[in-house]
């Protein structure tokens, strides 16, 4: 008897769990996309080589953009809408979270760190990249590591994890730095290049991307002990398991098929627009682990 | 030292940016004038509540910066919409900015219309009433046509200011003329050249339009 | 809906040192007022000089002032700000450049750029108001003054300007208020004035509705108080005998 009730119980639970998927009733973002016929992808203007504008301002390019397009393809298939319109909406570090929350952007794949703080506001896909937060500085600046920044002007981008780390570090270690919060990475680099800041703190991959854009790339160096290791993810609205599954599955499929290697090589180990510079940023071990065992957890 | 040659390959993108600026301007002027006229009529009406509300609206929008209004409509208003209806409306940056400009500029156009209406002699309105017209008819057929004629130069001047103010959409990343120029300049590493070019284009259009308005003003003044 | 309402957010820690979010708003308001007041002083002085120049019989002087107005009124404020902040410092002599970019605190150099930009921008508008005020006065007044043996500077100092300034107070009030509102563009070059602090609070606390509401209330109250203040000033200095002065 007891065994039977357990069996029935299991069957009922099983039915409850699978029912929504079977009925395929659309909710949340997928419903919104189906009804409007448009999926809106958030893009950046200067997160090189993840998501940026090079030749055509209407058409962002980059590693994360390629991955976002994989997701868009999967959504087309899922909704059986081959003509689904893909629209891009430019976001900044400071506006990306509100724009995902308020429905302007459905999916933001750029250079956004997945952390617990942000998970209170949005959900993240499985990780798409792994970075360390470091410094970009002129080769002859004498800055080798964070302690060298004492009393100096340091720039970072508003709305990033680096901004919080830098501001907190400044108080805790009484470094007396003057911190400039620029609007986006392009502007941060402009501050550095024009001599207003001695160093630019940001995710290392992005710093290499900025270097690739510089007038004289050889004059700059990425340095300093990483202050944190962070995993990037694509952001979507919180509490939308149906859409999250489509996003995650699309990314996992790209990882599994090995296509990710081609996409990685295209953006990190080959010449990239606008100047045709090669970032020469080989895959890290953490990144390889991320691809073999995809996870939506933040970095440890 | 300056290298302006890179602007030529960027011209198609810059043209797209300018078209977006002009589209935003045109729609904002139309929306702003319509809403502004309604506000002015409400402000001048005999109903206390109506005129009080219109007055508050105008004072409210005239006391906060346009940049703050843009942020409200881009970031917060869609969220409020979601709380109210439970669904998401993917309006996007352009529509958000357009609504922000219409709501904001309406407060300024309303004051122009109000001054224009108040400049019409009261006797005309009384005459219209004597002919058996209602308030709406008197406004539509007698007062507004004259008021608009008088106000046209002021409308145009305000619209030239608005043309320049559209550049503030930079704050939300909409690719208007200025933001396209900045983005292009950034990517090719020539921010100064593109900025100077953008400033020159704004100047030529704005100054040209100002001269035209002055000519028009002379003709209307007769 | 995943929004956590919290009107008490302003009293919570920002996570940076011992600051609470309200401290950020107060600092921001401080910068906004500091930008607006100094820019206004520049605008008032330069604008008055230019306004007088425009009404002078000397063609060169009035031409220079006219050119200034045309230039500064027809380029968007934001473009002017970028020019002052990003471009102009690069044309300074080497030693000044180092001082401006590296020795000064970033907030100070951004502040200088904003104040100069907003001051010169507003001066063009003040100039037009002053000119309108002077031209609105009956020609007979200056003619009478000349007839009494006044020199040109005397006519301006004793006859035209005292009256012109009083009749242009209402339009000048709105220019004064505009300086406060326009100072918000400083947020776009990283000066942490009120709007920038609001955005930072919204981003750090995730309570953007509360943050933007508080900012709106602050701007509204600030604007209304300044308007009341200017209304009081206007009443005090009204020109007796003109239509406006019999009211109240």
Image (cartoon, grey):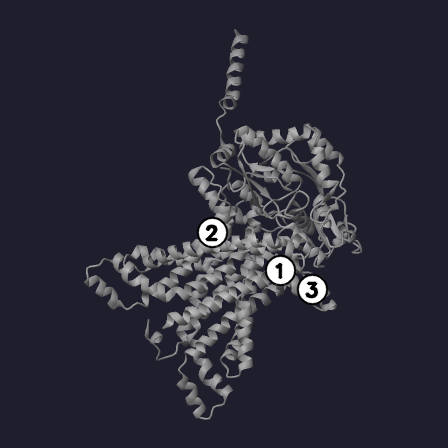
Q: CA distance from mark 1 to mark 3?
A: 14 Å
Helix, strand or loop at mark 1 = helix
Q: CA distance from mark 2 to mark 1?
A: 24 Å
Q: Which mark is residue A150?
A: none
| Letter of the chain that mark 2 sits on in the rendering | B
Q: Considering only vertical position in the picture, is B195 above or below A294?
A: below
Q: C27 or C111: nearer the eye?
A: C111
Q: Quadrant of residue A257?
A: top right
Helix, strand or loop at mark 3 = helix
- Relative image position of residue B17 (x, y in whole percent): 56, 53
Q: Tags 1 and 3 in contact by the CB under 8 Å rule?
A: no
Residue matched to label 3: C90
Q: B57 or C89: nearer the eye?
A: C89
Quick one: quadrant of the C terminus of chain C?
Answer: bottom left
| Letter of the chain that mark 1 sits on in the rendering | B
Residue at (46%, 61%) from the top-left corner?
B159
Q: Is residue A119 visible in the rendered structure shown here?
A: no
Residue B127 located left or right of residue A222:
left
Residue matched to label 1: B195
Helix, strand or loop at mark 2 = helix
Q: Which mark is residue B98?
A: 2
Q: Considering only vertical position in the picture, is A226 above or below A138?
A: above
């Amino acid at each position: 008897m007891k065994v039977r009730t357990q069996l029935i119980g299991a069957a009922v639970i099983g039915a409850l769990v699978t029912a929504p998927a079977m009925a395929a009733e659309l909710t949340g973002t997928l419903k919104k996309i189906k009804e409007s016929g448009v999926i809106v992808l958030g893009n950046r203007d200067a997160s090189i080589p993840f998501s940026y504008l090079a030749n055509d301002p209407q058409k962002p390019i980059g590693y994360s953009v390629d991955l976002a397009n994989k997701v868009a393809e999967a959504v087309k298939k899922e909704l059986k809408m081959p003509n689904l319109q893909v629209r891009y909406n430019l976001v900044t570090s400071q506006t990306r979270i509100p724009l995902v929350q308020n429905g302007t952007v459905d999916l933001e794949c750029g250079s956004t760190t997945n952390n617990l703080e942000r998970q209170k506001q949005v959900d993240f896909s499985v990780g798409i990249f792994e970075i360390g937060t470091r410094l970009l500085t002129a080769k002859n600046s004498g800055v080798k590591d964070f302690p060298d920044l004492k009393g100096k002007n340091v720039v970072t981008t508003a709305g990033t994890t680096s901004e919080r780390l830098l501001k907190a570090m400044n108080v805790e270690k009484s470094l007396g730095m003057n911190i400039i919060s620029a609007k986006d990475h392009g502007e941060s680099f402009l501050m550095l290049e024009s001599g207003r800041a001695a160093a630019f703190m940001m995710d290392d991959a992005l710093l290499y991307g900025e270097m690739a854009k510089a007038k004289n790339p050889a004059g700059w160096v990425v340095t300093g002990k990483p202050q944190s290791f962070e995993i990037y993810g694509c952001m979507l609205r919180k509490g939308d398991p149906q859409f999250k599954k489509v996003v995650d599955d699309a990314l996992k499929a790209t990882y599994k098929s090995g296509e990710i290697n081609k996409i990685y090589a295209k953006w990190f180990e080959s010449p990239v627009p606008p100047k045709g510079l090669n970032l020469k940023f080989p895959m890290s071990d953490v990144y390889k682990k991320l691809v073999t065992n995809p996870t939506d957890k933040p970095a440890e | 030292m300056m290298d302006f040659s890179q602007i030529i390959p960027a011209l198609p993108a810059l043209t797209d940016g300018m078209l977006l600026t002009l589209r935003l301007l045109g729609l904002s002027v139309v929306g702003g004038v319509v809403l502004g006229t309604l506000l002015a009529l409400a402000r001048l009406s005999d109903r206390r509540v109506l005129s009080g509300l219109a007055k508050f609206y105008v004072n409210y929008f005239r006391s906060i910066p346009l940049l703050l209004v843009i942020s409200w409509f881009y970031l917060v208003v869609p969220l409020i919409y979601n709380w109210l209806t439970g669904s998401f409306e993917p309006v996007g940056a352009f529509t958000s900015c357009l609504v922000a400009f219409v709501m904001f500029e309406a407060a300024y156009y309303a004051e122009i219309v109000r001054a224009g209406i108040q400049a019409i002699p009261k006797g005309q309105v009384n005459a219209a009433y004597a002919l058996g017209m209602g308030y709406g008819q008197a406004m539509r057929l007698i007062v507004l046509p004259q008021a608009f004629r008088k106000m046209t130069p002021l409308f145009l001047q305000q619209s030239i200011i608005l043309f320049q103010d559209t550049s503030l959409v930079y704050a939300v990343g909409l690719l208007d003329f200025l933001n396209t120029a900045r983005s292009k300049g950034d990517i090719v590493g020539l921010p100064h050249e593109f900025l100077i070019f953008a400033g020159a284009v704004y100047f030529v259009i704005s100054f040209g339009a100002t001269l035209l308005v002055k000519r028009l003003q002379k003709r209307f003044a007769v | 809906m995943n929004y956590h309402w919290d009107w008490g957010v302003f009293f919570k820690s920002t996570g940076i040192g011992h600051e609470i979010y309200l401290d950020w708003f107060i600092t921001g308001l401080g910068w906004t007022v500091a930008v607006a007041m100094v820019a206004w002083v520049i605008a008032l002085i330069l604008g008055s000089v230019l306004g007088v120049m425009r009404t002078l019989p000397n063609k060169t002087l009035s031409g220079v002032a006219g050119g200034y107005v045309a230039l500064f009124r027809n380029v968007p404020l934001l473009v002017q700000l970028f020019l002052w902040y990003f471009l102009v410092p690069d044309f300074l002599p080497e030693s000044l450049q180092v001082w401006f970019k590296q020795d000064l605190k970033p907030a100070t150099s951004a502040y200088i750029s904003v104040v100069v930009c907003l001051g010169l921008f507003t001066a063009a508008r003040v100039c037009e108001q002053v000119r309108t005020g002077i031209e609105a006065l009956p020609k007979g007044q200056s003619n009478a003054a000349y007839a009494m043996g006044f020199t040109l500077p005397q006519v301006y100092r004793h006859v035209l300007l005292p009256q012109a300034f009083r009749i242009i107070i209402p339009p000048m009030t709105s220019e004064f208020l505009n300086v406060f509102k326009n100072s918000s563009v400083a947020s776009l070059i990283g000066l942490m004035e009120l709007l920038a602090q609001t955005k930072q609070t919204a981003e750090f606390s995730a309570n953007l509705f509360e943050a933007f509401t508080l900012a709106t209330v602050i701007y509204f109250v600030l604007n209304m108080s300044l308007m009341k203040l200017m209304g009081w000033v206007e009443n005090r200095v009204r020109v007796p005998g003109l239509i406006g002065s019999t009211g109240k």
